Amino acid sequence: MTATIPASLAGERLDLVLVRLFPEYSRSRLQKWIKDGQVTVNQQKLRAKDTVFGGEIVELTVQLTEETRWQAQEIPLHIVYEDEFVIVINKPADLVVHPGAGNVDGTLGNALLHRFPELESVPRAGVVHRLDKDTTGLLVVARNLIAQKSLVEQLQAREFEREYQAMVVSVMTAGGTVNEPIGRH
């Protein structure tokens, strides 16, 4: 796969540019390919943190396997809302969002491709953000490329407002507010 880096991305890190040019792949996967030498810029191997000038030719020399491609799988989904642009899913705990190492099937991505086959043409089956496996909550999924681009831009500009609720196992004897970062465990 090859692409030309647009002048508008001059000065950006290589890994961030690749995310824009190849949105069907995660940033971590692209970084691994850069590190493994499977990405060249004007036939030179660069580091993920190297900046680009615009106009360069990027080549990915990656052999995609079936494990790399998401497969449709019949898994029940709790759809809260849908229109022509987005789908809002209530993700249950214990459901991984993206297929990946150790979780190639049984994920929300697999379920989305089964329920909405048209998502095959949208990078990452329209998934633009995620929730941890153990977290329950709403996920917004893009139904088409226009919605996907818009949602990604809104996330990058931090225009999404996220609200979290947590269950606390204890008693607050004097009342108050818990204002601490949310951890995984």
Image (cartoon, rainbow, N blue to C red):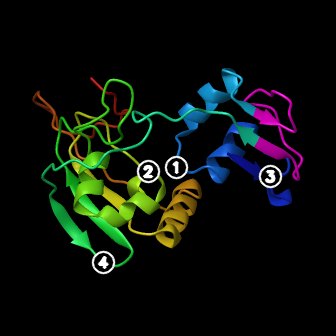
Identify residue for label 3.
5
The amino acid type of the residue labelled 4 equals Asp
Per the image, label 2 sits on a secondary structure element best described as: helix
Q: Whole-Å distance between the Cαs marked 4 and 3?
A: 33 Å
Q: Earlier in the sequence, mark 4 or mark 1?
A: 1
Along the viewing direction, whichever of 95 and 25 lies nearer the viewer: 25
Bounds of the magenta segment: 40-58
Of callouts 3 and 1, the N-terminal one: 3
Report the residue at 22% width, 33% height from top: 134
| Label 4, label 1: how far apart the Cα atoms are | 22 Å
90 in relation to 88, above or below: above
User: Which mark is on residue 83?
Assistant: 4
What residue is pinned by disc 2?
A: 124
Secondary structure beneath disc 1?
loop
Q: Is residue 155 visible?
A: yes
Kind of residue indicated by mark 1? Glu
Image coordinates for residue 89, horizontal then vertical, percent: 24, 58
- The residue depicted at 39 percent of the width and 55 percent of the height is 125
Q: Residues within 10 Å of mark 1 (few under 14, many from 20)?
A: some
Q: CA distance from mark 1 to mark 2?
A: 5 Å
Q: Decide: marks 1, 2 in contact (CB < 8 A)?
A: yes
x, y (%) of residue 124?
A: 44, 50
Q: Give the number of the disc on residue 24.
A: 1
Work out how far the residue at label 2 is from the one at label 4, CA to CA, in angstroms: 19 Å
**Seen in the image, is 93 located left or right of residue 146?**
left
**What amino acid type is highlighted by mark number 2?**
Arg
- Image coordinates of residue 55 in percent, x first then y, are 88, 53
Q: Nearer the viewer, mark 2 or mark 4?
A: 2
Dot 4 and dot 1 residues touching (CB under 8 Å):
no
